[in-house]
Image (spheres, rainbow, N blue to C red):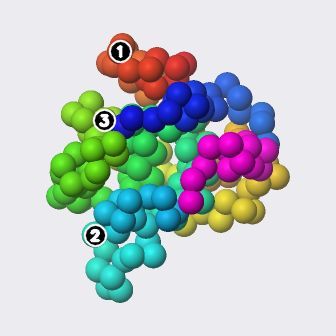
Amino acid sequence: MALSSKLQSWHIPLKDKDLKLSYVYDIFQEKYSHFQEDIPLIIQLVENPKYEIPGINFFNGATDLKTHDYVHILLARGLMSKDEAFVLGFTMGSTNKVSTTEEKIYAFVSQYLYPSVYQFDIEDIEVFKDAVRLGYICDCKPLDKVDYESLRDLSIEEARTRIGIPSDLLAAYFKIEKKRYPNAMESQRLV
């Protein structure tokens, strides 16, 4: 996923856990966020619950852009390709409802049907699959269902604790990802 250097540089590392969630979110919105309308329709159809067909759920963990941005902050991920793959996978995994088939279909869609600038490569798909499993095993609240507005006055770490996202699990995985992908800037800056 090709991003401007300004967007590539955005990242709130795990060690910045004492920053207030509202502070980080508001700065992100002011400087980096885009509008839901800026997201290509194919991505909105797949990832935004607004487009779900009643009674049919293709992908668990669908979120609107505001929720997605909060998840980026809480998972200590930036806006690059592996960051997006991790955030989407962890969010889906946190629902505890993702089947292997759903995971494979999402991987296919993100790799081949998304516009080229948003497509995942093989490494991104691996990060996505790892994140689905981490979201499942961490036993946190489903990230697509959290009321993030009620957490705004908490520090990032307090919000993680309230939701059940273990920072030590993220840190352990980030060390593995850093070792696996030595040429990926987003993986190298995690720890």
Q: Amino acid at mark 2?
A: Phe
**Residue 139, position in %: x, y?**
48, 51
Judge whether 116 appears above or below 98 on screen: above
What residue is drawn where x is 56% and y is 60%?
Answer: 35
In the displayed structure image, the side of residue 32 where residue 89 appears, left or right: left
Q: Which residue is mark 1?
A: 183
Q: Amino acid at mark 1?
A: Asn
Judge whether 76 appears above or below 109 on screen: above
Neighbours of disc 2 within 10 Å: few (<14), some (14-19), many (20+): some
C-alpha gap between disc 1 and disc 2: 33 Å
Q: Nearer the viewer, residue 34 or 138?
A: 34
Main secondary-structure element of the magenta-colored stretch: helix
Q: Is residue 126 magenta?
A: no
**Residue 125, position in %: x, y?**
26, 39
**Location of the C terminus (image quadrant):** top right
The tag on residue 124 is 3
Neighbours of disc 1 within 10 Å: few (<14), some (14-19), many (20+): few
What residue is drawn where x is 23% and y is 59%?
Answer: 102
What residue is drawn where x is 38% and y is 59%?
Answer: 40
Q: Which residue is mark 2?
A: 58
Dot placed on the residue nearer the N-terminal end, 3 or 2: 2
Q: What's the magenta region?
A: 22-35
Q: Is residue 33 magenta?
A: yes
Figure quadrant of residue 121: top left
